[in-house]
Amino acid sequence: MTVTWEELGWERLAPGVGRCRLPGWDCTVGLVLGAGTALVVDAGSSPAEGERLRTWAQQLAGHGVTHLALTHPHFDHVFGTAAFAGVRTYAAVGTDAVFAYEREELRRDAVRHGLPEADAAAAVAALAAPRHLVSGEWTLDLGDGRQVLLANVGPGHTAHDLAVLVPGSVSGTREIVFCGDLVEESGEPQAGPDAVPSRWPDALDRLLALGGEDALYVPGHGAVVDAVFVRRQRDELAARFGVS
Ligand SMILES: [Zn+2]
């Protein structure tokens, strides 16, 4: 028997769609279930956390995880990828180069944010380049009439921002957009040295065009928000970075 979302501490957003707010950095991980398929959105902040996520996803799905989408190459979203060996992994084009050539920066950033040295070293050693690199948009058919759109909407928070759109249904389920850290609710959007501030407002315009007015927008950190919130954050970022 499969467990319920609530029993595992996940938030159910629609039938077969939910997310979990992880401890530590309040990072969101998503799960979208199809017919014998399961798409996990982001992998957690360490190999051990990735293992935990994969187990939870399997319990919720009643079968194995088949797909993984990484919203952007920051440690709290990707250091669990080692636990997803054999899973079809998607990320924005260029993520492969970050994983290949910027491992030391990723490791240092994780340690600076409080990840134990050993976990950071293990995660970096096990980082595998995502097989499927998305430029533009990519439709994933998860079966059972469930199609999910992966959209390379950046640059913004990083040069490699991928959003995941789960379309609404005729029965009235709302669109759901997993935004990665292009949107944050629990704090100010974090702009590190790898951010592309001048392009960030445009990325949020693309995100809004993708989800529309009625979508549920799931930020990388914090509570689920609506289009009004995303538009306000877009305007605040534009003012903060001096772009229109
Ligand atoms: Zn980030």
Image (cartoon, grey):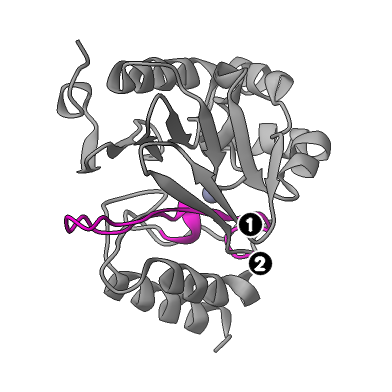
- CA gap between label 2 and label 1 equals 6 Å
Outermost top residue: 1
Q: Nearer the viewer, residue 188 or 69?
A: 69
Tag 2: amino acid: Val
Q: Which mark is residue 158?
A: 1
The residue located at (43%, 19%) in the rendering is 54
Residue 153 lies, in percent from the top left, at 58, 64
Q: Is residue 230 left or right of residue 152?
A: left
Using the image, tell me which numbered label, if any, was put on residue 196: 2
10 Å crowding of disc 2: few (<14), some (14-19), many (20+):
some
* Residue found 35% across the figure and 72% down from its top: 212
Check if mark 2's residue and mark 1's residue have beta carbons within 8 Å: yes
Above/below status of 6 relative to 192: above
Residue depicted at 55% across the width and 70% down the height: 203
Which image quarter is the N terminus in? top left
- Span colored in magenta: 155-183
Disc 1 secondary structure class = loop
* The stretch drawn in magenta includes residue 180: yes
